[in-house]
Image (cartoon, grey):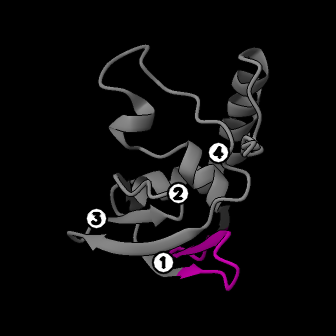
Amino acid sequence: MSDVWPTELRVSKDRRHLVVGFDDGASFDLPAEMLRVLSPSAEVQGHGPGQKVTVPGKRNVGIMSMTPTGNYAVRIGFDDMHDSGIFTWIYLRELGEKGQELFAVYEAELKEKGLSRDPAVRSH
């Protein structure tokens, strides 16, 4: 898996998807919401075992920026100002291949905790 190499990283016009193509011909359309809630950042993953955070309210999140990190990853900035996740090529490939099941686990965690994918409505 270490020779995973992207040939395409393209954000959709609506900023809600990242298309990732790899040199073996595989291509994945990764929703911004999935990338945000499964971000590899310490803010989401925690700093140790059992510290993973379930991030609610990101259904409409968009991708604002992508910054190359070395030759192995990209840092993705989201419009909720989260930008500390460094997505390696291997992790992007994993999200492409297993993202649906990982997202289903996330949705189950939300339900279990009484949280929602929809942003909280603020009253004035």
User: Percent position (x, y) of residue 23?
Assistant: 48, 77
Going from N to C along the chain, the mark reached first, 4 or 2, is: 2
User: What's the distance in space between the residues labelled 4 and 1, CA to CA?
Assistant: 19 Å
The residue beneath circle 4 is: 98
Residue at screen point 58% across, 43% down: 37
Instruction: Choose mark 1 or mark 2, whichever is in front.
Output: 2
Q: Does the magenta stretch include residue 21?
A: yes
The region drawn magenta spans 10-28
Q: Residues within 10 Å of mark 1 (few under 14, many from 20)?
A: few
Query: What amino acid is labelled 2 in the image?
Result: Asp
Q: In this rendering, is residue 98 above or below 21?
A: above
Task: Say what secondary structure mark 2 lies in.
Answer: loop
Q: Is residue 76 left or right of residue 79?
A: left
Residue at screen point 65% across, 47% down: 99
The residue beneath circle 1 is: 23
Query: What amino acid is labelled 3 in the image?
Result: Tyr
Q: Nearer the viewer, residue 50 or 60?
A: 60
Disc assigned to residue 72:
3
The residue beneath circle 2 is: 80
User: Percent position (x, y) of residue 112?
Assistant: 75, 15
Going from N to C along the chain, the mark reached first, 1 or 2, is: 1
Task: Say what secondary structure mark 3 lies in.
Answer: loop
Instruction: Choose mark 4 or mark 2, whichever is in front.
Output: 2
